[in-house]
Amino acid sequence: MIEAARAEIAALALPHEASPTGKVVTFSAGIATYSEGQDQGPAQLIARADSALYRAKDLGRNRSVSA
């Protein structure tokens, strides 16, 4: 689902001239799922998703990365 949304946004090729990182709008996502026993609460789940988002950006943006 996330990858389909990313591809749809990329296909639009929306201009983003003010961006220092690219000429068109892109979409990056960090994905995490709750695991009983692994996550102690919502904050830890959000932190893992946030970490995955920054990995996606570090890998070149316009992608999704799972935690």
Image: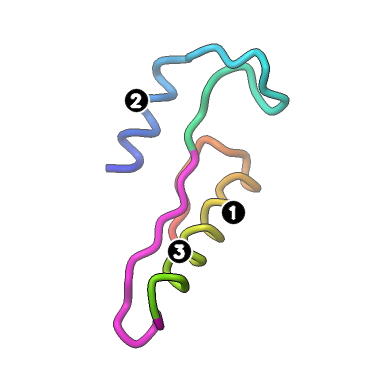
Which element is circle 1 on?
helix
Q: Residues within 10 Å of mark 3 (few under 14, many from 20)?
A: some
Q: Which residue is mark 2?
A: 8
Along the viewing direction, whichever of 16 and 10 lies nearer the viewer: 16
Q: Eyeballing the image, is 30 above or below 3?
A: below
Q: Residue at x 47, y 73 (%)?
A: 44
Asked if residue 16 lies in the magenta stretch, the reply is no
Question: Image check: 45 left or right of 15?
Answer: left
Quadrant hosting residue 7: top left
Q: Position of residue 49 (x, y in %)?
A: 46, 60
Q: Residue at x 55, y 48 (%)?
A: 56
Instruction: Say whether disc 1 or disc 3 marks the residue closer to the N-terminus.
Output: 3
- Which one is closest to the eye, mark 3 or mark 2? 3
Disc 3, disc 2: CB below 8 Å? no
Q: Which residue is mark 1?
A: 55
Q: Eyeballing the image, is 28 above or below 11?
A: below
Magenta span of residues? 28-40
Instruction: Say whether disc 1 or disc 2 marks the residue closer to the N-terminus.
Output: 2
